[in-house]
Each structure stands twice: as structure tokens, then as C-alpha cells.
Image (cartoon, coloured by chain):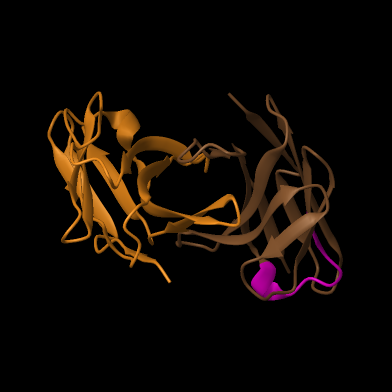
Chain colours: A orange, B brown
Amino acid sequence: AQTVTQSQPEMSVQEAETVTLSCTYDTSESDYYLFWYKQPPSRQMILVIRQEAYKQQNATENRFSVNFQKAAKSFSLKISDSQLGDAAMYFCAYRSIIQGAQKLVFGQGTRLTINP
Amino acid sequence: SQTIHQWPATLVQPVGSPLSLECTVEGTSNPNLYWYRQAAGRGLQLLFYSVGIGQISSEVPQNLSASRPQDRQFILSSKKLLLSDSGFYLCASDRQGASGNTIYFGEGSWLTVV
């Protein structure tokens, strides 16, 4: 079974600075997807970024980028120019396919605080 | 894109009472549907998924059940709630047949069992 580990329960960063959130996973599959989701106080799950395992190039979405190390099974999220609106819980997730459906396995989450 | 509606948004129920949480999806047809639960301070855990009407698969043994009476309707139920059923429940959907397609989440339902 796949597992996802986020070793940082809480992180904080000064506004406009850069912060990196860590995530490691365990799997025996060779083809999979990885995601970072943001959960603000409203509890809505918002997709931040995703990475296909077969792509060597790291995904980027505006101020968000990942460092995907497939051999090390590491998938960290870098947030540049942090903004107050980035404050939220961040979840790393691994996607596997089960009977035609997508199963997401989530890490425990990292609570990110932005200091003004 | 898809829109997912969940209700009720908040629910306080006594131990032993029944439960019904509803989820409906707009903007797509024949979606895969999912129920996730988030316990306090934890990540989400997949409870049930459905690839079609009347087709329900359970990921973890529990006190809950799910049903899909219509293509875009997914219901989470319990006959007798336990304290351990408390949590935040999220319905999700995606489009069938497309690998790596986006999974959309509803706004969630807070359940407190007292």
C-alpha cells in the first residue's frame, strides 16, 4: 500500500519570503501522479499543483513549484513570494488507480503560517 | 469544470441516531464519485468510491454505508452513529476515463456526534 509522509506539522514564513514544504512517499508503482492541495480555514480542498511521475521536468504554477525526486521518492513544494492568502493547511497526496477510479492517499498535512 | 454540492454543511447528532449526507454533482455526466473523511488534525481518508449507479466500493471497514441512486448523486449513511464517526466529510468527483484528470471536492459537511 502507498503511504505519504509530511514531516513538518507546522511551518511559518515571513511575507514575501520563500518556503519549502516536504513530502515523501512510498510506492512500488512506476507510473503515478502526485498532488499538493491547499485547505484554507473554509476547509475547501484546492488543487495547487500536480506532477506526473513519468515527467522529469518539475511542475510549476505561478509562485508554486515542486522538486520531484523520483528515486528518492520525494516531492517538496516551494512557495515563492509568500502572501498572506497562502496561509492554510497543505496536503501532499499520491494518486493510484483502483478499478477505473482515482484513489488519493494523503499525508498528515503541514500548517503554513504567513507572518506579515 | 464540475461543481459539487453537499448538505447539510453542519450536523450535530446524538450517538445511535441515523445519518444521511447528500452530494450532487453538476457540470459532468457519468462521473466517478468519492466520499472522504477528515478526522481532526489529519489528512483525508477515502471511505467509498463509485464508478456508476448502484456500484459502491468500500475502502475501509466502518459503521457507514454509501449509495448512488442517480448518476450524479452520492449519499453517505449510517443506521446508528458512533462517537468515532465525528469528522469532516468531503464528497469528490472526477471524469471517467481520463488518466490524471482533476479531482473536484465539495465544500464538506461537519459531523459532530454527541
Question: Is residue B107 shown to the viewer in this render?
Answer: no
The region drawn magenta spans B76-85
Quadrant including the C terminus of chain A: top left
Q: Is residue B77 magenta?
A: yes
* Number of numbered discs visible in the structure rendering: 0
Residue B82: image quadrant is bottom right
Q: Position of residue B102 (x, y in %)?
A: 49, 35
**Residue drawn at (68%, 24%), measured in percent from left and top?**
B27
Q: Is residue A103 magenta?
A: no
Q: Nearer the viewer, residue B89 or A114?
A: B89
Residue B24: image quadrant is top right
Q: Nearer the viewer, residue B62 or A95?
A: A95
Question: In the displayed structure, does residue A81 sit left or right of residue A40?
Answer: left
Question: Is residue B29 shown to the viewer in this render?
Answer: yes
Q: Position of residue A94 (x, y in %)?
A: 39, 54
**Residue drawn at (36%, 56%), measured in percent from left and top?**
A109
Q: Position of residue B53 (x, y in %)?
A: 81, 47
Q: Is residue A9 above or below residue B4?
A: below
Residue A3: image quadrant is bottom left
